[in-house]
Amino acid sequence: MVAEQWLSDSRTVVDGWIRDDIAAMEALPGSVEEVMAYALTAGGKRLRPQLMLAAAEYVSVDWEALRPAVLAVEYLHTYSLIHDDLPAMDDDELRRGKPTAHIAFGEAQAILAGDALLTEAFFKMAALSPGFAPERVIRASRRLALAAGREGLVRGQVLDLAAEYQTVDVQQLERIHRLKTGALFSAALSLPAILAGDREAEELLSAFGEHFGLAFQMVDDMLNVIGDAQTLGKATGTDANRGKATYPRLMGLEAVRQLVDEHCRAALALVDPERGEHLAALLAFARDRSW
Ligand code: GRG
């Protein structure tokens, strides 16, 4: 119950920060800000921001001081989803049950909104100074840039697109998801520790994020299979990621469930149970979620 309250409170805080930021943007009809606002408020779970707030508690950083970094990570995440949905990428018409940005506003507007969100993310990171020492802000910005760029999300997306309709083994799939999913979770979790100047916590939170990201992705793949099977009225089905390798396809659902548990155990073993109470709550949420 306490954990549930924390999950609800932290989400409310993040939603409020995003709402305030959108209000300051003047999202007029027809503007790129309108598209940014649409994507930012389309029902995201806010998991990365919540993990950052839990990590902030772990290293005793004030939530409010972390606000620009939290917004930066959620903006970057939102950009990646808008661009991932484009016809040239995954070509999806629905996200979170709503029309994707390019369906609702057109392709050019969606591309530009993604570009603006990515740029805004690093503008926000710069706003962490003077609250934190400039050298820590620079390290944190570099960490986020590495996770986002050619050695992170972008590389993951390149490999993911290249793997479509190809034979992929579990090792290759894990590499894709370490980059596409794990890199941003890991960076998000390490930012509070970098800003606190706590190298030990930075390492363990970063590793926690990698395990979290992989477990999260596996659950996502399983939910796709189960959702698809329900939609089709079958006990098992092909999953929604047509043309793509997924964990259930390569290993079967039971083996994936076991792997999720292993990653969760490995993540929990890294953190001090008292300080990491809310990290554990988020891990349990990600493992047991149904959406
Ligand atoms: C376009 C450079 C570029 C990268 C795109 C992140 C990504 C790479 C693609 C998104 C598609 C996808 C399935 C990524 C794997 C990570 C993942 C499951 C993202 C969805 O994260 P959630 O569930 O999103 O936290 P919400 O909707 O809750 O915000």
Image (cartoon, rainbow, N blue to C red):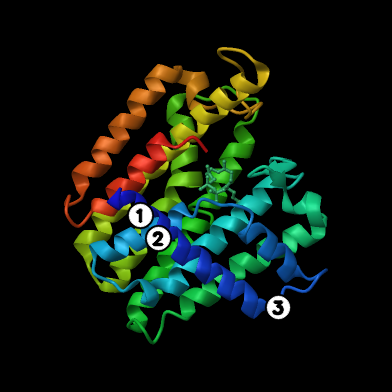
Q: Are marks 3 and 2 in contact (CB under 8 Å)?
A: no
Would you say the residues marked 2 and 1 are in contact, meaning their CB atoms lie under 8 Å apart?
yes
Residue, disc 3: 26
Q: Amino acid at mark 2?
A: Asp
**Residue at 44% of width from left, 70% of height from top?**
69
The quadrant holding residue 22 is bottom right
Neighbour tally class for label 2: few under 14, some 14-19, many 20 plus, Cα within 10 Å: few
| Mark 3 Cα shell of 10 Å, populated few (<14), some (14-19), many (≥20) | few
Number of residues whose C-alpha sits closer than 10 Å to that of mark 1, classed few (under 14), some (14–19) or many (20 or more): few
Residue located at (62% from left, 24% from top): 228
Q: Nearer the viewer, residue 96 or 140?
A: 96
Give the amino acid type for the residue marked by disc 1 in the picture. Gln
Of 178 and 54, nearer the camera is: 54
Q: Secondary structure at mark 1?
A: helix
Q: Which residue is mark 1?
A: 5
Which residue is drawn at the image coordinates 38% and 87% (left, top)? Answer: 130
Q: Secondary structure at mark 3?
A: loop
Of the two numbered discs 3 and 1 on the same chain, state the one appearing first in sequence.
1
Tag in front: 3 or 2: 2
Q: Is mark 3 within 8 Å of ligand 1?
A: no
Residue 187 visible, this angle: no
Query: In the image, residue 115 lies at what x, y percent?
Result: 67, 64
Would you say 266 lies left or right of 232 here? left
Return the x and y of residue 153 as percentages of the image width and height: 53, 51
Which residue sits at x=33%, y=76%?
A: 136
Q: Count the numbered circles shown.
A: 3
Q: Tell me the CA gap for discs 3 and 2.
A: 27 Å
Q: Which residue is mark 2?
A: 9
Q: Distance of mark 2 from mark 1, alpha carbons?
A: 6 Å
